[in-house]
Amino acid sequence: MTGKAKPKKHTAKEIAAKIDAATTNRGGGKAGQADRTGIEKGGHAKYECPHCKITAPDLKSMQIHHDARHPKIPYEESKLVNLHQVLTGDSSKTRPGIRGSHKK
């Protein structure tokens, strides 16, 4: 018996998905902590909320956060802190989310 109609071989789509997951930096775990907090320039966290100091990657995400968390305070884009302009970092470092790895 072969095992309840399970495919015996992996599909090309499944193999490609596994390779993509193994070779793309998603910025998770301890290695991506600096990126998520916006400590280094070039991270995903570009804007910082002036009220609660939470970070967001773009203006639309920050507006959604503001509408959900601070509904009584009017939303003003001019008060947002752009972390990419404020913080300076080493430009030779690889940016997160960039495809590439030594595993191939």
Image (cartoon, grey):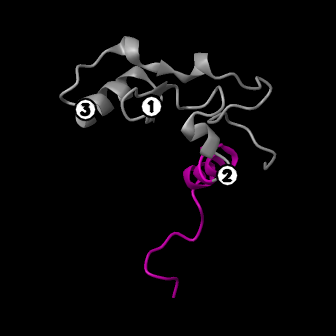
Q: CA gap, disc 2 to disc 1?
A: 26 Å
Where disc 2 sits, the SS reads helix
3 within the magenta span: yes
Q: Tell me which label, 2 or 3, sits earlier in the chain.
A: 2
When the figure is inspected, residue 14 is found, relative to residue 6, above or below; the finding is above
Q: Residue at x 38, y 35 (%)?
A: 52
Residue 85 x %, y %:
59, 16
Q: Residue at x 64, y 26 (%)?
A: 42
First to last magenta residue range = 1-29
Residue placed under numbered mark 3 in the picture:
70
Residue 51 x %, y %:
36, 30
Q: CA gap, disc 2 to disc 3?
A: 38 Å
Mark in the foreground, 3 or 1: 3
When the figure is inspected, residue 69 is found, relative to residue 12, above or below; the finding is above
When the figure is inspected, residue 58 is found, relative to residue 68, above or below; the finding is above
Residue placed under numbered mark 2 in the picture:
22
| Amino acid type indicated by mark 1 | Ala
| Amino acid type indicated by mark 2 | Ala
Residue 17 x %, y %:
58, 50
| Amino acid type indicated by mark 3 | His
Query: Which label sits on residue 11?
Result: none
Contact between labelled residues 1 and 3, with CB atoms less than 8 Å apart: no
Where disc 1 sits, the SS reads strand
Query: Picture quarter containing residue 94?
Result: top right
